[in-house]
Amino acid sequence: MCAKIRRQEALDFHESKPAGKIEVTPTKPLSSQHDLALAYSPGVAEPCLEIAANKEDVYRYTAKGNLVGVISNGTAVLGLGNIGPEASKPVMEGKGVLFKKFAGIDVFDIEIDETDPDKFIQIVKSLEPTFGGINLEDIKAPESFKIERELREKMSIPVMHDDQHGTAIISSAALINALEVCGKKIEEVTIVVSGAGAAAIACTDLYTSLGARKENILMTDSKGVVKKSRGNLDESKARYATDREDVNTLEEALVGADVFLGLSIGNILKPATLKKMAKDPIVFALANPDPEIAYDLAMKTRKDILMATGRSDHPNQVNNVLGFPYIFRGALDVRATAINEEMKLAAVKAIADLAKQTVPEMVLKAYGQSNLKFGREYLIPKPLDPRLITTISPAVAKAAIASGVARIEIKDWEKYELELQERIGIDQRLISRIVTRARRNPKRVVFAEADDVNILKAAQMSMDEGVAIPILLGNEEKIISLIKENELEGLLDCKITDPYKEEARVNQYAEVFYKMRQRKGMTLKMAQKSMMRSRNHFGAMMVQLGEGDALISGLSNDYPKTILPALQVIGVEPGINRVAGMYIISNNKGNFFFADTTVNLNPTAEELVDIIGLTARVVKFFDTEPRIAMLSYSNFGSARGEVPEKAAKAVKLAKEKWPQLVIDGDIQANVALNKDLLRENYPFSELAKNPANTLIFPDLDSGNIAYKLLMELGGAEAIGPVLMGMNKSVHVLQVGSSVRDIFNMVAIAVVDAQLNEKREKAK
């Protein structure tokens, strides 16, 4: 689903401190005078002298080899047109974020105030010493063709205009597979292109490289079919100008055509015209946000259609993020001097082939599918497929080596694949997958603190993203006032529940609560007071009685004050002895799971086994195979004490209960995470092959301290706390959570509720 984005929300997102979307982070320690002397004067002189003697050493001693310049002059920004270099900067920063997230590539965005192509070329060429590669972005045609062509000729680093070639590569992969599905040959099909801009030309160029014949291609622009007789055509359009005089319009060109490629404007392709195309028409309607023909309308018009769009809410999304991060990754890793045709074709083939492989379970879960199989509705991989980097980047690197543009050669490809995974942390897209799963079946989420503006913003975001159906709990007048004050009018359509106006429900809930706890010291009057005064009790009862599917609370209360009502009303899952809390700690090394960080003060060895079992199950919920370290201050009995002995006993008991579980300890935290230390000193450990991703702490003190220190001093993002073991979906926020933190927890709560529903149905 394409999320509805509100203007103010987008502005707030970019304005929040620090402004923008990127920052520069040092990669070396700078904590002492000695460090500073090494990083700058006098130590920095040594690598300078080495590079002066041998320019190639710039790749040894600087970040050049992993640094791409995203460069624009702002002449063709998105669908906004020529809005200038300053206005293009948010887009360039965004591109940098995608490079980093999907391929671990660092970016400097450069916005140049120059529209003269020759001067622009001169400026970019002068930046070659800085960058390992150049990604040109949002430059209008036809100047973009000249700029890219001359920079490729003049520079000895990879240069690519992604607006052209990204779309070309992804759509080419889709075309290859679409032709295979319908049994047609590329050299025989007729192709009609709507649009004659940079992307359309690049797509058509690549289609001809794959075997499409120019005489079978008709290109149209705003004036109709591009013909040789028109005159004054720029070189790029002239390549595909036809000498046919019997066709003048898009409608005429499409009669009997096999393929429609749209890179033009929305709703230009009419149903009546679509009906005139050949059997099994291939329609790539890539205009955004409105395709050349709406997906549902196209599918209704032709049952035999094979269709792709640029939208994420339909099958076969042609999304450039499937290509550019991984293409540059492969090019940088062999220090390619260019991104040539062979490398682009290698990327096309890799993407096309990946769609024919069995789709991993984590991808199916992310997109809410029970099955994804190569065919009409699955022509290209999904953007969240973790195999993209290990499929495309090696293919591009191999093509660079084979075509002679690589300056270094990779020998061990298995090792390279592991390096690719480690570079970005293969689990980095965890929350993206959870959000996508939540969208497939949104649930009713009770927000117990709906009189907080951050809760309301998160509720609005959850609704806009299609993740949840908010139920707002609190003082109705105050909630409505905050909604209007903060321009969150969409929430006015949500259910608002004010316990002070719900006397009948308060009495009903109190009666149920009293019956639950009448032999635990509860009186009816106490139950009524709890339901009237405690929104956590009221919200928990809503979920318990099926009037909501999940409860979110805790932003303004201590953790125990939030969890206790949920335990009293909802209770633990059958067969579970205790609840526990877990945080997901995300950094540039990946995702790590910490437990217990919120509930159990000083668990016994037997209680730790319960926590281990809960944690292992929830880690799998996040599409990750747990590798568990039971932590202490000792390594496998190297020190005596209560904690090491408790940890070792817990591991022994856990292995007896779950023989297949990868777990070891007692072990120190740094050793559990360091493969070199493990392999050198403890090769017998179950973690020696792959270090831990799941850390079980011996007590609440150590777990709580550890994750908070990492958040504040280690620059890690913490997702959580995830409450484990409840009978229904209840999740407790950390005090002071941001809107994004709350939204993440809502997505987790929704998927948790989905699984609860599935378990109930299975009973």
Image (cartoon, rainbow, N blue to C red):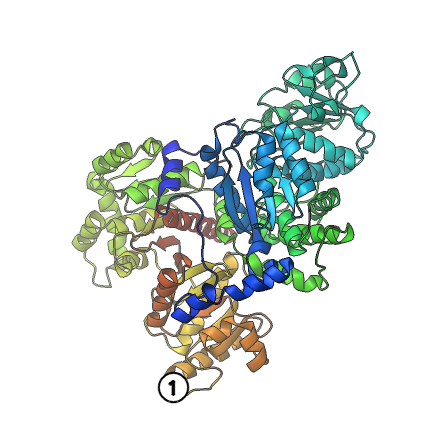
Residue 629, x across and y down, in percent = 49, 72
Query: Quick check: 532 left or right of 168?
Result: left
Q: Nearer the viewer, residue 283 or 342?
A: 342
Residue 319, x across and y down, in percent = 60, 39
Query: Quick check: 501 left or right of 736?
Result: left
Task: For residue 547, say whether it is visible.
Answer: no
Q: Disc count in the image?
A: 1
Q: Nearer the viewer, residue 82 or 588?
A: 82
The residue to which callout 1 is attached is: 641
Query: Quick check: 223 left or right of 489?
Result: right
Can you say whether 626 is above or below 460 in the image?
below
Can you say whether 337 is above or below 586 in the image?
above
Residue 192, x across and y down, in percent = 72, 24
Task: For residue 689, say whether it is visible.
Answer: yes
Q: Amino acid at mark 1?
A: Gly
**SS of the residue under disc 1:** loop
Which residue corresponds to the image point at 39% horizontal and 75% vertical from the top-left? Answer: 698
Residue 45, x across and y down, in percent = 51, 64
Can you say whether 286 is above or below 424 in the image?
above
